[in-house]
Image: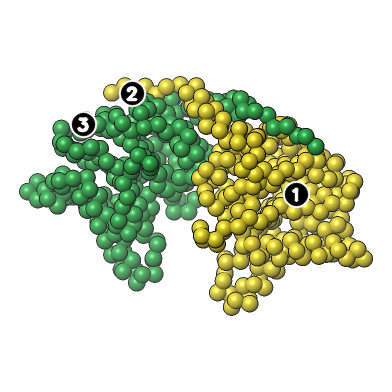
Chain colours: A green, B yellow
């Protein structure tokens, strides 16, 4: 499993992903699920992935390969004119990768090689954008109504994001919100694990304005994890009491 | 879908269930999922069910039928010597009901008729007990380590129960906790719906000491639902702030 969240704020984009991969509970590893490409001052494109690791690594490796051929920038994320064309190309690549693997396995592996990708970024002259790319290759874009996307194990950490999200919030508050959401998820699902990768993309910065890898030793994450329990209990006790009338 | 929670406290048992059933999103209905049988002063047995409605209704109807034959109490929940035998019998009945339906459909409906049941209650001379009965007919019992069971759509409402539960809490606090957990779930999953059924079984009471059907018009539930958002935001802001150092 996996847990990744991408969030649109007025000030830019905030992204967080875990790093656990597992094939059963007796075979777990740590793999980065967040990757980015930049042309300083012109564009930044970040992807986060959930699903079959061989599939998502194949997609990311192909995207990476293409940026290495400087004469053929059209085919590369670094040469595409808009974030829409970037999402379209990543969708095509994702679907083709899944299809190829399924065909090679006589379609017996249907749903086995599936994956989803969050695409976030900005190209100069346009707004920051956030997309959710489905295994079928099509995608949706975040909007004022739905300003964040989650992939993987999304349910445990969703209620706090629904209640806490505010488009005008600071990057610091958004990071705090994501830490709480990830902490709730980590406590409930063994297949989501530390360390976490964090990236802030400030609007018109065209580079990661802040990144962090949050390990089990991270003091801030530890303080959130330990104080959130107390804060929740205080919140709970501040609610009106139920009256048993019978 | 469904959401039901059964909880063991020092003072007794607290149970809550929703009432929504759906076959697709365009065919929703309201059905009670909590049923109980009592012998005043001697025993109370309550079940809550999740899964295929025809299956769970068949099980409950058969349990009900048996209590109507006063000369044959051995076969009835009202005549069984312990809660363990009650859970065993409900498990047998559940598995047989699922098996029968699957065989009648040439096993093509495998997993289609599945269901799970929470069994809670107390028989005089013994402690209150709580069981989770699987579709296979076997079951587990709540313990000090795992003092509550959830069935159905459990993920959204789980983090708050993990953080808020305390074995020594009052019935009023436990009800408040369940209201918050159900509110988070209702906000996230359309297939869990109001009204909610609530039952408190005080230890050695051998009757429901409090019951309530919580509708959309319930003022207490409305106040929890509206104030929980504010309380959560206050809790969130009470946490230490993240420092962006780059």
* Mark 2–mark 1 distance (CA, rounded to whole Å): 50 Å
Residue in the picture at 57% in, 27% down: A235
* Residue A200 in the image: above or below residue B138: above
Residue A117 is at least partly visible in this image: no
Q: Give the farthest residue toward the front.
A: B217
User: Label 2, on which residue?
Assistant: B244
Crowding near the residue tagged with mark 2, few <14, some 14–19, many ≥20 C-alpha atoms within 10 Å:
few
Labels 2 and 1 share a subunit: yes
Residue A148 vs residue B138: left or right? left
Camera-side mark, 1 or 3: 3
| Front position in the image: B232 or A179 | B232
Q: Chain of mark 1?
A: B
Q: Position of residue A160 (x, y in %)?
A: 48, 35
**Left or right of residue A124, residue B63 in this image:** right
Contact between marks 1 and 3 (CB within 8 A): the answer is no
Q: Position of residue A175 (x, y in %)?
A: 39, 30
Q: Secondary structure at mark 2?
A: loop
Disc 1, SS: strand
- Return the residue at label 1: B120
- Above or below B239: residue A132: below
Residue B102 in sight: yes
Q: CA distance from mark 1 to mark 3?
A: 59 Å
Residue underneath mark 3: A204
Give x and y (percent) for residue A142. Answer: 33, 43
Residue A47, relative to residue B60: is it above or below?
above
Left-right relation of B129 to A51: right
Give the mark, 2 or 1, whose residue is nearer the N terminus. Answer: 1
Label 3: few (<14), some or many (≥20) within 10 Å? Answer: some
Q: Quadrant of residue A232?
A: top right
Question: Which quadrant of the view contains residue A135?
Answer: bottom left
Residue at 35%, 28% in the rendered image: A168
């Amino acid at each position: 499993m996996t847990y990744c969240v991408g969030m649109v704020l007025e000030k830019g984009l905030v992204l967080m992903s875990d790093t656990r991969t597992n094939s059963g509970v007796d075979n777990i590893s740590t793999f980065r699920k967040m990757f980015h490409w930049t042309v300083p001052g012109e564009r930044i494109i970040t992807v986060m992935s959930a699903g079959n690791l061989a599939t998502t690594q194949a997609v990311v490796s192909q995207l990476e390969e293409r940026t290495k051929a400087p004469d053929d920038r059209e085919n590369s994320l670094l040469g595409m004119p808009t974030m829409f064309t970037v999402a379209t190309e990543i969708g095509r690549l994702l679907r083709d990768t899944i299809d190829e693997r399924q065909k090679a396995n006589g379609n017996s592996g249907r749903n086995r090689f599936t994956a989803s990708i969050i695409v976030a970024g900005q190209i100069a002259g346009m707004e920051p954008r956030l997309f959710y790319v489905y295994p079928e290759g099509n995608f949706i874009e975040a909007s004022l109504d739905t300003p964040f996307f989650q992939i993987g194990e999304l349910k445990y950490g969703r209620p706090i994001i629904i209640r806490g999200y505010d488009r005008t919030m600071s990057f610091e508050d958004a990071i705090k919100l994501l830490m709480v959401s990830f902490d709730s998820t980590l406590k409930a699902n063994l297949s989501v694990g530390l360390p976490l990768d964090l990236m802030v993309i400030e609007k018109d910065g065209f580079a990661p304005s802040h990144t962090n890898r949050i390990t089990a030793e991270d003091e801030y994450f530890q303080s959130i994890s330990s104080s959130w329990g107390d804060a929740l209990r205080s919140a709970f006790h501040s609610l009106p009491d139920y009256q048993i009338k019978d």
